[in-house]
Amino acid sequence: MNLFLQIWGGGFYLSNKILLAIAEGRPKKSKRLLKLAGWLIYILGVPAWVIILISKQNWIAASIEVGGVPSMLFGLYNVYKKKEVSSKRFDIIALSVTYASLALGVSYSMLEYGGINSITQLLEIGVMIGFLLGSYFLAKNRFFGWLLFMLMNGSMATLMFIQNKPILSIQQLFSLCFVIYGFTLAIKSHRKANHAIDRTENTSVQN
């Protein structure tokens, strides 16, 4: 059962990072389809991660996975509706659930361990910051969400290694490679878009 959960959770999460990374810099139609598949696959992998994390009493990380679902659905909705600008209503809902989940997870972990006094808790906090803010900013099409995902993958890889989950640790390192790749493509795409805007503005001024 443990091996199955590692393959399920790790495989789905790695697929998510691969699809989101490949989507950067692609034409709009293919980019939309890849992102749509990426967000959906991520959501389907959440149950396996929640079970694994709870079994290891990683309460902060487990609450993050649950709390991050609205951001994932938010990203999925934005891609499906072809929205570049986020809806304020969904924005507020995602943020509310995110912070409520964060507060619950941290509070329960501190109650369980008598404060923040273990390496695993510090790693979970790294995962928490990277995952929640990273998924939130990527759902809003902000490229710096990739930087936060780097923090998340590095922290989770270390946590899984410490807790004898080698498959998930390796998966997180592979995911980190695709996150770096996605960030590089996102930067190039961002610069290209800004350059196009500058050229348009210069043309308008000249005319």
Image (spheres, grey):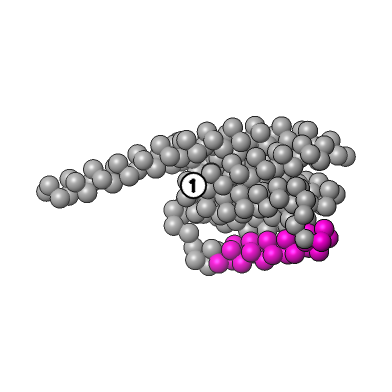
Q: Magenta residues: mostly which secondary structure?
A: helix
Residue 8: image location, x then y, percent? 76, 39
Residue at 35 percent across and 39 percent down: it is 192
Q: Identify the residue at image location x=63%, y=61%.
A: 98
Q: Amino acid at mark 1?
A: Phe
Instruction: Report the residue that reaches farthest toward the left.
Output: 207
Whether 38 is among the magenta residues is no
Residue 161 lies, with reference to residue 70, above or below; the image says above
Reading the image, the residue beneath label 1 is 144
Question: What range is drawn magenta here?
Answer: 92-114
The answer to whether residue 149 is visible is: yes
Element on which disc 1 rests: loop
User: Label 1: how many residues lie within 10 Å, few (<14), some (14-19) or many (20+)?
Assistant: some
Residue 115 position, x and y percent, is 77, 60
Percent coordinates x, y for residue 74 in the rendering: 57, 56
Relative to the observer, which residue lies in front, 29 or 150? 150
Residue at the (61%, 49%) spot, across then down: 130
